[in-house]
Amino acid sequence: MIDLCVLGPGGRMGQQVCDLAIASDSVRLASAVERKGAPAVGSVIASSSISIGDALPSGLSQAQVYIDFTSPAATAEAAHQAIAHKTAAVVGTTGLDSPCQKALDELSNVAPVFVAANFSPGVALLLHLAKTAAAALGSEYDLEVVEMHHRNKVDAPSGTALALGEALAEGRGLNLEAARESNRDGQVGPRRQGEIGMFAVRGGDIVGEHTAFLIGDEERIEIAHRAQKRSVFAAGALRAARWVVTQPPGRYSMSDLLGF
């Protein structure tokens, strides 16, 4: 049994993680922490005796590992605070910036840190297949990524779409930042060699869909993943938490967990 702290329990993913942790026989929900002033602070998580707090050091000190689906700024702060307690981290926050990555790197010097844009085993396989396909088919096939999410998602492209673009770029030997094109509008001219198109669709309650297109002159290959329930991500995060506490300090990903 491992003791878990959940950051952002009032959010969609945080609620899912708490629900699954409470029902688990291998994880104990030890604490839950929200940002100061959040409406959920002081409330008790359903089917538990855990009251949601806003004191990050206290929450982290009660746990072996924390799961974080919050914001880049909150993720960086949690990583800094976790260093003192050497608390393992499972981070699913997307849109991580340089300060956040630096904070996670610093934590990884003293504790295992697991970072994934998507905790679905199927998405991990999608990335593996996309990289393999891009390498096998070569430069005669154009690369495109299309992702779809619910209307309330705040970042675009999604973290998973960027990971998918990175997998295609690695397979082709490209630099994603140099190859990426997300703004075709007007007289943009012909598609440049080595370009990776990346486009976002937002609407309704779509949980998450990602498709890699490898398009040749005579055929098109599509490698796609469609999440049917958000719980698949929460279950994957708990699986990562159970695994990462057994690892030495360092940075880990779904590829490490699944052995790719």
Image (cartoon, rainbow, N blue to C red):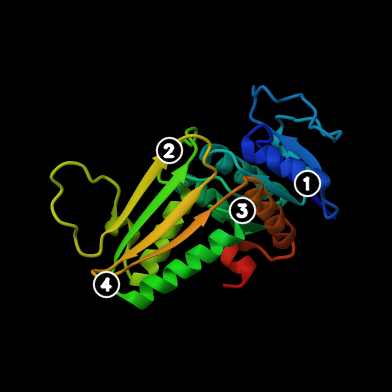
Instruction: Return the mark for residue 218.
Output: none
Residue 92 x/y as whole percent? 58, 48
Q: Which residue is mark 3?
A: 107
Of the numbered discs 2 and 3, the one sitting upstream in the chain is 3
Q: How much space separates mark 3 and mark 4, taking CA atoms?
A: 39 Å
Quadrant of the image containing the C terminus: bottom right
Q: For residue 30, what is the image quadrant?
A: top right
Of the numbered discs 2 and 1, the one sitting upstream in the chain is 1
Figure disc tally = 4
Identify the residue at horizontal 43%, vertical 52% (top origin): 161
Secondary structure found at label 3: helix
Amino acid type at mark 2: Arg
Q: Which residue is mark 2?
A: 202
Q: How much space separates mark 2 and mark 4, taking CA atoms?
A: 30 Å
The mark closer to the camera, 2 or 4, is: 2
Above or below for 259 versus 67:
below
Q: Does residue 240 appear in the picture of this structure?
A: yes
Quadrant of the image containing the N terminus: bottom right
